[in-house]
Image (cartoon, rainbow, N blue to C red):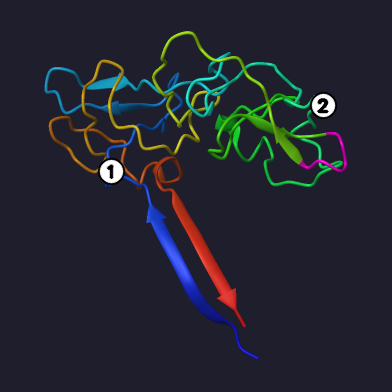
Amino acid sequence: SSWNLRSCKHKEKDLQMNYCRNPDGELRPWCFTTSPSKRWEYCNIPLSGLGSQCLSGKGEDYRGTIAITESGNACQHWNMQFPHKHGWIPDRYPCKGLEENYCRNPNGEKRPWCYTTTSSVRWEYCAIPLCDEERTEASKECYRGKGQSYRGTTSITASGKKCQAWNSMFPHRHEKTPDRFPDAYVYLTFSCFILQ
């Protein structure tokens, strides 16, 4: 029996692009700008854990502490696999706010939810109070620590300047190139299915 490569998707986010990165241990992700008068700037990317305390839209940015479902079931801790096994592991999804056993919406459901501690009820929606005013949808990207592992697609600085592509030397010459910082820039995602 032989193995065949059936389907393989390849997505690349590297120095051909102008995404904000932190290759050299700055305080947070940054980029060279396309403005001749401003060499570089930090990018406006939220730290993991910031978010709303009330329901806005589908509640994907909800970061409150409600931990009970609308029918009264207690929520299972996100880092536990009992009574319900699941794939929403907090370390795998640092930007989803999967802390303690708080209601969250990591997958775009209608509103925040949680796995329950009741073995006969896998998951349920939570009753989150609505926000008083219309909020703008929070960024789906964030970073932890100094953002050296950030691989999002933000390419605008905090003041609104467009980022210069990392492989470009115009308008600013620099040494932050892929051969000098290969791990800081290259981000390859392979989704391959191997069938017999």
Q: Residue at x 41, y 30 (%)?
A: 22
Marks 2 and 1 in Cβ contact (< 8 Å): no
Badge 2 or badge 1: first in the primary sequence: 1
Tell me residue 100's x, y (percent).
Answer: 75, 24
Helix, strand or loop for the magenta stretch, by majority: loop
Tell me residue 79's x, y (percent).
Answer: 76, 35
- Give the labeled residue for mark 2: 74
For this orientation, the residue located farthest to the front is 71
What kind of residue is marked 2?
A: Ala
Q: Secondary structure at mark 1?
A: loop
Q: Is residue 118 magenta?
A: yes
Q: Residue at x 19, y 41 (%)?
A: 168
What is the number of callouts on the image? 2
- Give the labeled residue for mark 1: 17
Q: The C terminus is located in which quarter? A: bottom right
Is residue 152 shown above or below 186?
Answer: above
Badge 1: how crowded within 10 Å, few (<14), some, or many (20+)?
A: some
| Inter-mark Cα distance, 2 to 1 | 45 Å
Q: Secondary structure at mark 2?
A: loop
Q: Residue at x 81, y 37 (%)?
A: 80
Q: Which region is colored magenta?
A: 117-122
Q: Is residue 42 magenta?
A: no
Left or right: 79 with respect to 138? right
Left or right: 2 with respect to 114? left
